Amino acid sequence: MMGLSDADWTAILLSLRVASVATIVSLPLGVALAYILARCRFPGRTLLDGIIHLPLVMPPVVTGYLLLLSFGRKGPIGSFLDQCCGLVFSFRWTGAALAAAVMGLPLMVRAIRLTIEGLDRRLEQAAGTLGARPLFVFATVTLPLAAPGILAGSILSFAKALGEFGATITFVSNIPGETQTIPSAIYSFTQVPGGDASALRLTAVSIAISLVALIASEILARRLNRQVAGFS
């Protein structure tokens, strides 16, 4: 495909792996945070909202450095996870997934939150009056109705994870075959003579993957919206 080298394919597959893991792992947390922000009123709610969205306004390098301090081998969280679970983030692909998840979480939470805030709560209340427990109502009514927003948030998070560079390179460096994703590989190619062709190939691949994801999400969102309309 377009003369891609083995190194190019390694970066592409690693990017897809990192973005997929980051999106899947952060999805339950994203849904929970979005629901809390949309439905709950408590002291510190505004602060929580600000903390969640900090990665969007802070320089990505700052986010990566904070992750390194916290989840590095000598960091409080990183050293604990290493000793108790053997889970290492710094300079590993798992760290790239963590950085991508942190950077994509605000977009996911915002999309899901806006959807939940726009739901007709009478449907949930009706289920409650029939004796359904809150958790059952959430699983069988709220989540299906919020499915289009959850899908949109997941796609936004995936796209952000796929293009994440600053936090990733600060936290896990740019190690070929281990942490070198598409953006990192493009950056490396632009720093060496004759690397423009490889950088352009990976740029085209990145655009193609993003377009496919967006088109697929649009098709799925339309189907989900029709289902939700029929359900409501």
Image (cartoon, grey):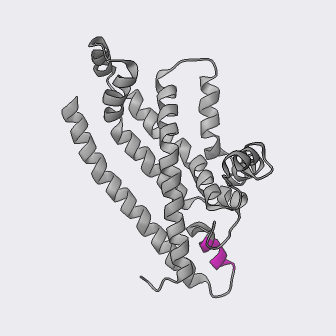
Question: What residue range appears in magenta?
Answer: 185-191
Q: Nearer the viewer, residue 56 or 78?
A: 78
Q: Is residue 21 left or right of residue 48?
A: left
Q: Is residue 147 left or right of residue 178?
A: left
* Viewport quadrant of the C terminus: top left
Q: Residue at x 71, y 57 (%)?
A: 90
Q: Residue at x 63, y 52 (%)?
A: 99
Q: Up-down: is 12 above or below 121?
A: below
Q: Magenta part mainly helix, strand or loop?
A: helix
Residue 108: x and y in percent read 49, 43
Q: Up-down: is 2 above or below 137?
A: below
Residue 188 highlighted magenta (yes or no): yes
Residue 111: x and y in percent read 45, 40
Q: Residue at x 47, y 49 (%)?
A: 24
Name the outermost residue toward the right. 74
Q: How many marks?
A: 0
Residue 139: x and y in percent read 36, 30
Residue 231: x and y in percent read 21, 31
Q: Residue at x 57, y 49 (%)?
A: 101
Q: Up-down: is 177 above or below 222?
A: below
Residue 121 highlighted magenta (yes or no): no
* Viewport quadrant of the N terminus: bottom left
Q: Nearer the viewer, residue 15 or 191?
A: 15
The answer to which image quadrant residue 212 occupies is bottom left
